Image: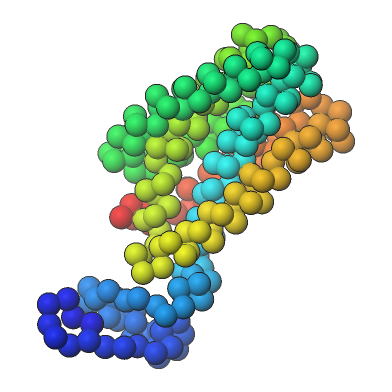
Amino acid sequence: MGRGGARSAIVTGGARGIGRGCALALAAAGHDIAPVAPLWSAFTTHRRAVLACFGLTMAWTAASYVYITFMPTFAAQSLGLAPRDAQAGVVFASLTNIVVVPLAGLMADRWGRGPMVVSAAGFALLSIPLFLMLVSLQSFAGLVAVAVVAGGLLGLYNGAAPHALCALFPTSVRYTALSVGYNGAVMIFGGFAPFIATLLVRESGLAIAPSFYVTACAVATLGVLLAMRRKELLA
């Protein structure tokens, strides 16, 4: 398929075998390749990138649901804070996130995945200490402190991750492949996060148990980030 010429080529069976080789050769030559079945292509040709997208989303969504969605209920029921104070803590986390996001975007333009690595490492190293402090203080001031730190770490990831995830895929399959990897992780690690956090507290008897879940997801995401080459995260 030429950009400026009148010639065009249709490659059948582009997901495997000879057809896949032809499609890759045309793509390497700078031509635009539009697969007929982008979902099939996402699970075959781009399966590694889909798995990377899935891994990069784990900490992002787990931390968001635990520190934003689950935290008010946790603060009210486990810490005994007033519902109004528990909700106010989320406001502080959101405001911090809003401030940090554009700064993280600027940093990502210069240092690529740097903000994402800092965020994932922060959640891996600080989640348990943050919950220990929260449970120890059981105060509105403690909740605000945790909310600000978590909001800042989320802001670092929120500002850098969208571009990094999009850069994993060519435009011909970007929407389909990205939706599979991202939404799959959100459904599993985000949608079930409140349930898992509550289950961990009930089964372990430890009020800090939700931090174990965030830490595990953050370690997994950090591993994916460190394993990937820089060029895979930058368009």
The image shows residue 230, relative to residue 40, as above or below, that is above
User: Residue shown at 66%/18% (left/top)?
Assistant: 86
For the question of whether residue 73 can be seen, the reply is: yes
Q: Position of residue 122 (x, y in %)?
A: 53, 31
Task: Report whether residue 124 is seen.
Answer: no
Q: Could you say where residue 43 lies in the image, as x and y percent from the top left?
A: 53, 71
Q: How is the image coloured?
A: rainbow
Q: Position of residue 93 (x, y in %)?
A: 53, 23
Residue 7 figure quarter: bottom left
How many discs appear?
0
Screen quadrant of the C terminus: bottom left
| Residue positioned 60% across, 49% down in the render | 186
In the picture shown, does residue 22 fall above or below 194? below
The N terminus sits in image quarter: bottom left
- Residue nearer the viewer, 18 or 75: 75
Q: Quadrant of residue 171?
A: bottom left
Residue 213: image x %, image y %? Answer: 69, 38
At x 66%, y 41%, the residue is: 216
Residue that appears at 34% across and 82% down: 23
Q: Is residue 26 left or right of residue 215?
A: left
Relative to 47, is 113 above or below? above
Query: Residue 127 is drawn in which quadrant?
Result: top right
Q: Nearer the viewer, residue 67 or 221?
A: 67
Judged left or right of residue 178, residue 199 is right
Name the one closer to the observer, 174 or 229.
174
163 lies above or below 148: below
Name the outermost residue toward the front: 84
